[in-house]
Image: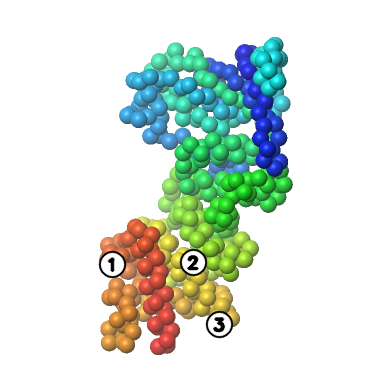
């Protein structure tokens, strides 16, 4: 057990469901934080979906210009702002010695040896000091200012993490999508967190949360072409992976601007997308094969964005016919592989890149047109519009 002098500060807010909280402010040596992995991060992964952190960025903890390690070893090395920690259980004990005012006391804070200190903010500072201590062992005694919360619910940690980080810098998109998913689920289930809906969860964030749920279905449903082949946050890239989860979330969230799609359940939309992407896989099988997928842009941003933006048009065609399944979707998409003769009355409505068959070669990095390797959102939209136009032309002459 460690006993340190600390301030206990009572703070509060007036949001719906908010309650007063105590913060313990003190300083702890690096050694105490790192011994036995006492200071820990709750990292998000497919097996720990209630986590909220990413692994430390190597660029910030390597001894190079601009890194925290460089700051310690060759620069000022002072951290005036505190690391934010949380203790989830009831092992934290405070013995008050002096009351400074109604909301601030000074006393002794007892931290049990078995207590885990969950890092809400400051993981790069701790990791950088750990690495720098290999060169300067005296850094084991480096006193880090810390603010300690005692929140029993780890979701409260996520809320604090999101507020602290999103309001001083942009949280990386991939992990932010997963934060939105957790917050959305909490708002819909637990009345305590209703204030999140007006403060954090706007329409855009709700779409991202729902899209993240759809992606989870795409990863787990056996008939999905993405089943077990989506790389989630924090995972190393493996040959089996087809696409990153944040790419799918980003583009699927745009579909939820469409009223008819937004009115569906997560399961209903996921089922439609499974049919849709299964049809695409049937048309372009090489782009989904482990040993060949990297030769094509179909499952890069270019293809994923273009086909996602095309989806509402294809869905509308199928709905108009009164039949929405994989085969009806495939019947529309397979028109893309047909050529439009240059002497066709409608040929002038499309340029040569889209009059030709849009086959696997079209999506090939080596042999496809330059537009199939585009990287701008405007061009992705253009591709989807041209694909829709081609299908429209060929439906008329069928």
- Residue at image point 63% right, 28% down: 149
The N terminus - image quarter? top right
- Residue at image point 45% right, 16% down: 139
Q: Position of residue 284 (x, y in %)?
A: 41, 68
Q: Is residue 136 left or right of residue 200?
A: left
Q: Is residue 273 left or right of residue 186?
A: left
Contact check, label 3 and label 2, Cβ < 8 Å: no
Circle 3 sits on which residue?
321
Along the line of sight, the residue nearer the viewer: 73 or 379: 379
Does any portion of residue 14 appear in the rendered image? yes
Does any portion of residue 46 appear in the rendered image? no
Q: Position of residue 166 (x, y in %)?
A: 51, 40
Along the line of sight, the residue nearer the viewer: 287 or 252: 252
**How many dots with numbers?**
3
Label 2, secondary structure: give it.
helix
Circle 2 sits on which residue?
277
Along the line of sight, the residue nearer the viewer: 224 or 315: 315
Label 1, secondary structure: give it.
loop
Label 1, residues with CA under 10 Å away: few <14, some 14-19, many ≥20: some
| Colour scheme of the picture | rainbow
Label 3, secondary structure: give it.
helix
């Amino acid at each position: 057990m460690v006993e340190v002098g600390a301030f206990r500060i009572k703070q509060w807010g007036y949001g719906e469901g908010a309650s007063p909280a105590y913060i313990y402010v003190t300083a702890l040596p690096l050694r105490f934080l790192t011994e036995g992995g006492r200071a820990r991060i709750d990292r998000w992964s497919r097996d720990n979906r209630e986590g909220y952190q990413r692994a430390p960025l190597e660029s910030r903890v390597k001894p190079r210009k601009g890194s925290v390690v460089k700051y310690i070893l060759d620069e000022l090395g002072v951290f005036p702002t505190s690391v934010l920690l949380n203790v989830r259980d009831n092992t934290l004990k405070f013995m008050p010695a002096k009351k400074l005012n109604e909301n601030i006391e000074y006393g002794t804070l007892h931290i049990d040896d078995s207590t885990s200190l969950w890092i809400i903010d400051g993981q790069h500072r701790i990791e950088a000091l750990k690495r720098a201590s290999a060169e300067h062992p005296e850094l084991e005694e480096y006193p880090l200012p810390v603010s300690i919360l005692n929140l029993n619910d780890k979701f409260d940690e996520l809320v604090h993490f999101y507020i602290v980080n999103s309001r001083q810098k942009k949280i990386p998109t991939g992990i932010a999508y997963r934060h939105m998913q957790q917050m959305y689920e909490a708002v819909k289930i637990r009345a305590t967190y209703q204030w999140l809906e007006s403060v954090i969860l706007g329409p855009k964030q709700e779409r991202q949360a729902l899209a993240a749920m759809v992606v989870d279905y795409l990863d787990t449903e056996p008939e999905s072409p993405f089943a077990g082949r989506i790389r989630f946050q924090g995972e190393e890239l493996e040959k089996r992976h087809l696409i990153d989860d944040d790419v799918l979330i980003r583009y699927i969230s745009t579909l939820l601007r469409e009223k008819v799609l937004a009115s569906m359940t997560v399961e209903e939309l996921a089922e439609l997308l499974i049919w849709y992407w299964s049809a695409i896989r049937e048309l372009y099988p090489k782009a989904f094969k482990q040993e060949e997928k990297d030769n094509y842009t179909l499952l890069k941003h270019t293809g994923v964005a273009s086909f996602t933006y095309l989806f509402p048009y294809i869905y509308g065609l199928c709905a108009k016919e009164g039949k929405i399944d994989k085969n009806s979707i495939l019947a529309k998409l397979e028109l893309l592989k047909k050529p439009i003769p240059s002497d066709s009355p409608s040929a002038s409505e499309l340029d040569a890149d889209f009059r030709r068959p849009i086959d696997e070669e079209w999506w090939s990095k080596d042999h496809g047109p330059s537009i199939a390797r585009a990287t701008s959102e405007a061009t992705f939209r253009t591709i989807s519009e041209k694909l829709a136009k081609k299908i429209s032309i060929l439906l008329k002459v069928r």
